[in-house]
Image (tube, rainbow, N blue to C red):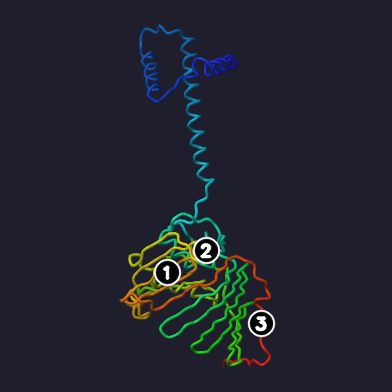
């Protein structure tokens, strides 16, 4: 009997019932009719045919429901196959981004929110493995040329920075390797050596952690550890924290502009009273490397619109292999060690 019913169901769903569209309204009408028939005193419908008809209806409902369920499952599964890229700060946690490395050459064509831009500038450590280049930093009192190389792989830090101040005739070289830091003062023919306690494995820092309150309710800024190499550009934590904390004071002028062949986001805004006094400026403009948060260019302006402070990157390369020989402590023999007591 079961086999015969199965054959009948298959035959009906592939022939007479094949083109029937059994929507919710029709289901309600059929169920209402069946109920009315049960209440009727005259049961003129043959018992055997009632069973067959009911089975046919159940079969259609079953296959319709299964088809809808299958499509819904595919939609849900399909949404999981598309990983969500970094979203606003609400979806970012420290554990989610710990030791995260993002290819700097990725096609990050989507627009970033203000929180995402700020987050990347506070956590540039997580977005590249190596960097090398040069930039010029200038303020009303001095001009510095910075040449740098940094490698951060597998939790190990190695770095080189050469700072040239032509006005003061000073050249200083800083080398970081094997948890040690050496600074060479070329004009004085002296050098310093010390340990460096920076951990690259501490993970990213959230906006809530950066902008907190002390026990008295006063605003404080918690800093993330970062290498002391080209920090104004590669690790612009202070600039980001001080300039961009108040979202109402700045805006995104351009989501994607080209600078030295790299995609950058252009930001402009007003400086608060404290920053205005400190930098002798009232407004600023930043060119931020889109995929890493690195500061490529910066300008602050006087009330008259003149540039007061600036940082201009001249050479820039990310994630290109740098040999270990570039970070060796080659201290000249005639250099004397500076002892700190």
Residue 103 lies, in percent from the top left, at 57, 60
Question: Which secondary structure lies at badge 1?
Answer: strand
> Which circle marks residue 261 in the picture?
2
Residue mark closest to the camera, 2 vs 3 = 2
Residue 230 vertical placement versus 90 (above, below): below
Residue mark closest to the camera, 3 vs 1 = 1
> Which circle marks residue 329 in the picture?
3
> Which circle marks residue 107 in the picture?
none
Q: Earlier in the sequence, mark 2 or mark 3?
A: 2
Residue 194 lies, in percent from the top left, at 60, 84
Residue 61 vertical placement versus 149 (above, below): above
Residue 303 lies, in percent from the top left, at 31, 76
Q: Relative to residue 161, is residue 311 drawn left or right? A: left
Q: Relative to residue 224, is residue 175 drawn left or right? A: right
Q: Earlier in the sequence, mark 1 or mark 2?
A: 2
Question: Which secondary structure lies at badge 2?
Answer: loop
For residue 324, which quarter of the picture? bottom right
Q: Nearer the viewer, residue 40 or 196?
A: 196
> Which circle marks residue 286 in the picture?
1
Quarter of the picture holding the C terminus? bottom right
Q: How far, Cα to Cα, is label 3 from label 1?
A: 35 Å
């Amino acid at each position: 009997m079961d086999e015969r019913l199965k054959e009948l169901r298959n035959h009906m769903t592939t022939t007479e019932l094949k083109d029937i569209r059994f929507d919710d309204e029709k289901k309600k009408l059929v169920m209402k009719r069946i109920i009315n028939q049960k209440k009727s005193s005259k049961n003129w419908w043959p018992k055997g045919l009632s069973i067959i008809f009911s089975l046919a209806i159940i079969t259609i409902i079953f296959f319709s429901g299964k088809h809808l369920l299958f499509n819904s499952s595919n939609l849900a599964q399909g949404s999981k196959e598309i990983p969500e890229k970094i979203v606003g700060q609400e979806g970012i946690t420290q554990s989610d981004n710990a030791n995260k490395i993002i290819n700097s050459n990725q096609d990050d064509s989507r627009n970033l929110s203000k929180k995402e831009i700020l987050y990347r500038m506070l956590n540039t450590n997580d977005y590249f493995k190596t960097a090398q280049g040069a930039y010029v930093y200038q303020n009303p009192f001095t001009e510095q040329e910075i040449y740098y190389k940094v490698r951060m792989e597998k939790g190990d830090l190695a770095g080189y920075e050469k700072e040239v101040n032509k006005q003061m005739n000073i050249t200083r070289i800083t080398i970081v390797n094997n948890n040690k830091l050496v600074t060479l003062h070329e004009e004085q023919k002296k050098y310093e050596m010390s340990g460096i306690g920076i951990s690259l494995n501490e993970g990213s820092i959230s906006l809530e952690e950066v902008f907190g309150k002390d026990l008295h309710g006063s605003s404080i800024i918690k800093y993330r550890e970062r290498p002391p190499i080209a920090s104004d550009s590669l690790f612009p934590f202070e600039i980001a924290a001080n300039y961009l904390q108040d979202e109402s004071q700045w805006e995104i002028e351009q989501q994607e502009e080209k600078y030295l062949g790299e995609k950058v986001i252009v930001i402009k805004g007003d400086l608060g009273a404290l920053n205005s006094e400190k930098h002798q400026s009232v407004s600023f403009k930043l060119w931020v490397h889109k995929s890493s948060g690195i500061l490529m260019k910066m300008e602050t302006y006087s009330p008259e619109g003149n540039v007061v402070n600036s940082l201009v990157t001249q050479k820039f390369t990310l994630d290109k292999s740098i040999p270990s020989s570039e970070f060796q402590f080659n201290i000249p023999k005639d250099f004397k060690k500076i002892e700190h007591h």
